[in-house]
Image (tube, grey):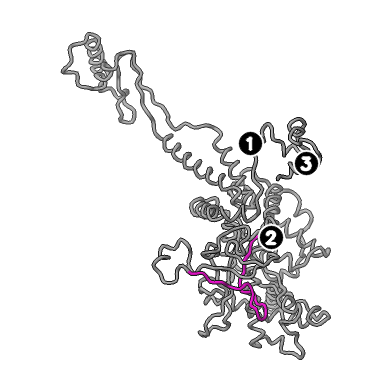
Amino acid sequence: MSIESDLAELLGEDLSVRQVAFGGAYESADRNNQLAMWDPPIRSADAEILPEKARIDARARDTLRNDAYAAGGATIHKDSIVGARFLLNSKPETKVLFGREDETWEAEYQEEVETKFTLWAESDTNWADASRINTLTGLVRLAVGVHTMGGEVLAAAEWMPDDGRPYRSAMQMIDADRLCNPPGEQYGPVSRIRGGVERDRRGAPIAYHIRTQHPADWARYTREGSYVWRRVMAHKPNWGRQNILHIYEQLRPDQTRGIAQMATALSEMRMLKNFRNVELQRAVLQATYAASIESDLPPAEVYAAMGADTSSRESNPTLDWANDFLTAVNQYAGSGPNMRIDGAKIPVFMPGTHLKLQNPGAGGQDGAQLETSLLRHVAASLDLSYEQLSRDYTQTNYSSARASMGQTWKAMQVRKKLVADRTANFVFRLWLEEAINYGHLESLKRRNAPNFYEGLNAEAYTACEWIGAGQGQIDPLKETQAAILRVKNGFSTKEVEIARISGGDWRKVARQNARERRNDETLGIPSIYDAEATPSENALSGTPQERES
């Protein structure tokens, strides 16, 4: 029984007659006119995603491999979110740990933890990566790129062998294709495992079923143990340490796996690639010419005029007359310099015959508009502005550039919090837990130091922010002045502004400023710090071009 039939039975009338006669309350539910053939089914989130996820992921990866715009968009994500170095900015919650604010201990803890963690995480020996390929920054960039491509990130906490490494904790990135149901546990409405994720009755993940090798590995049938799944608990049963990091953004409740946002524009990306290929072929054809001959004579006589052999044919008066005419023309102008163009001889045909050169590659005038329209669809699916994706700033002024940059910055900050920060937090928490247990932090060698595993202490110890790529500046003078005014009037801090503009650590910037000031004083050099910090109002008037001139 459907909802409509139940409602009709309840009202005691034929509801379909009312709908046909009067229509529904919402035009979007109208079954007539343009919407008559639009009748998508109602399905759960997993029923919509899981059966089609493999195909969508394959198409997204193929697009990123072979489409320059899509690949550039993914790179913009990594550059705008992570940048060249992803830095820890520790912010322990001392009120939770000690019941009161302790700025002295907080500063000591921050300096020690940031220094030691960064040395370990950004070491060229790649301690943070179980595969020993990436630094922490490389791992976070990989996570952002994978999320852009497939809508989810999968990683595992590993306890590495004692081979001389300073800490045995590391993160292992896992291809999300390996997260799948083992044999005998196929997807279904009552299955306890969906998309390789085993969940309890409330939907919380209990365990992850990870295949030891990729399903498409060419050697999967020949290698020993290739058709094997590992069941990995989501958390350690004894003390709750997180084993698996699975990042994806839920679009609906009860959704088990993620889907790439760029999936909404894959058809436009494919059309755009095909359009560019056709445009390239048209450009090649446009550089060539096709010749056609128009004549009032019979075809056979035209062929003879073009040099065909007519010795076996009977004499034709028309052809004899034309040959006499062309012979006379040849005697008159056969060696004349004006009958050649750049050394190419101009052919002379019999009367009534015309040689026409045609351009077969001539195309329409709407090609550029069509490409721009498709690129705007692609940019919207990647949360980028059209100008950034296309690198076309010909129609951009300062105001529109600021608007597009601000919109993209907001989208990148959301992705940073969802993907980049969570990936880095996973690594940081593994390291900090081990460092505390080993007693490697001098700032915690104090009486009655709070236990890491009690209450919210773990969250208080690991509370932090991450400094990624700076937003950049279009007009450095105006935007620097605005940052100074925000700090002076208490609307922002140096920490926030330095991270926003350059992606730097405010403590390191402050220490470097102090060093330079002392060095200037020692050498007797006039210090720039003694000059007026803010430009005059006149210097900020006019356009950037006028100020530069």
Look at the picture and state if 332 lies above or below 225. Answer: above
Q: Which residues are magenta?
A: 228-248
What residue occupies the far left of the structure in this picture? 312
As measured in the structure, the alpha-carbon distance from the residue carrying label 3 to the one carrying label 1 is: 26 Å
The question of residue 299 being in magenta is answered with no
Place of residue 403 in the rendered image (x, y in percent of width and height, measured from the top left)? 71, 50
Q: Which class describes the residues within 10 Å of circle 1: few (<14), some (14-19), or many (20+)?
A: few
Say which amino acid is labelled 3.
Answer: Glu
As measured in the structure, the alpha-carbon distance from the residue carrying label 3 to the one carrying label 2 is: 52 Å
Q: Secondary structure at mark 1?
A: loop
**In the image: residue 459, left or right of residue 210:** right
The N terminus - image quarter: top right
Q: Which class describes the residues within 10 Å of circle 3: few (<14), some (14-19), or many (20+)?
A: few
The residue mark sitting in front, 3 or 1, is 3
- Give the camera-side residue of 121 and 131: 131
**Disc 1 target residue:** 37
Q: Quadrant of residue 116?
A: bottom right
Q: Is residue 161 visible?
A: yes
Place of residue 501 in the rendered image (x, y in percent of width and height, measured from the top left)? 69, 62
Say which amino acid is labelled 2.
Answer: Gln
Q: Earlier in the sequence, mark 2 or mark 1?
A: 1
**Disc 2 target residue:** 413
User: For the point 72% across and 86% down, which residue is it?
Assistant: 444
The residue mark sitting in front, 3 or 2, is 3
